[in-house]
Image (cartoon, rainbow, N blue to C red):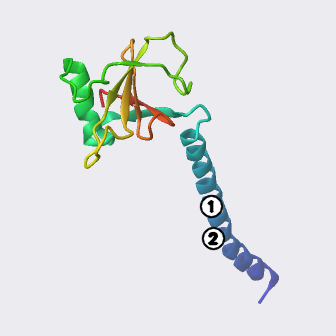
Amino acid sequence: MTVPSRLRRLRRLRRPQIALIALIAALGIGYAINAARDDHPSGLGSGTVALSTLPAQVTDTVHLIESGGPFPYRQDGEIFNNAEHHLPAEPRGYYHEYTVTTPHSADRGARRIIIGKNDEYYYTSDHYDTFRRVDVSR
């Protein structure tokens, strides 16, 4: 085997390895970006989630809010104080909370929709630990 043919063979072997390394690096970067988005320190996940991607009971609750009720729980529509400071800071009375029913739950469960005076919707599935802004038009 001559020297030029050895170099060509070596180059052919390296191309798949370089492509594999680049693919692994791209996947790692993508994973890190998604993890940073979903683990926002304020408890408010960055980005907006489409209503259609959430459980059907969330859509049911949004429709009840838009039609003015009737609501299944007496606490629905009460002021949400944002005591955990996970939502943007606003004056008291700006936010109101509504229960998202949880199938087979003996109580109200942990799921809520919070709505602001400017019609911004937030969803929490873990009783106010984390929130996602909801685009109710999608």
Residue at 30%, 31% (x, y): give it: 138
Q: Disc 2 on helix, strand or loop?
A: helix
Q: x and y percent of residue 105 in the render?
A: 29, 46
Residue placed under numbered mark 2 in the picture: 16
Residue at 73%, 77% (x, y): give it: 10
Q: x and y percent of residue 19 in the render?
A: 63, 64
Residue at 31%, 27% (x, y): give it: 136
Taking the image as shown, residue 58 lies to the left or right of residue 23, namely: left
Q: x and y percent of residue 34 in the render?
A: 55, 45
Neighbor class of circle 2 (other Cα within 10 Å; few <14, some 14-19, many 20+) is: few
Vertical arrangement, residue 102 with respect to residue 133, above or below: below
Vertical arrangement, residue 73 with respect to residue 37, above or below: above
| Kind of residue at disc 2 | Pro
Vertical arrangement, residue 92 with respect to residue 56, above or below: above
Decide which of tag 2 and tag 1 comes sooner along the chain: 2
Numbered mark located on residue 24 in the image? 1
> For residue 73, what is the image quadrant?
top left
> For residue 115, what is the image quadrant?
top left
Nearer to the camera, 18 or 120: 120
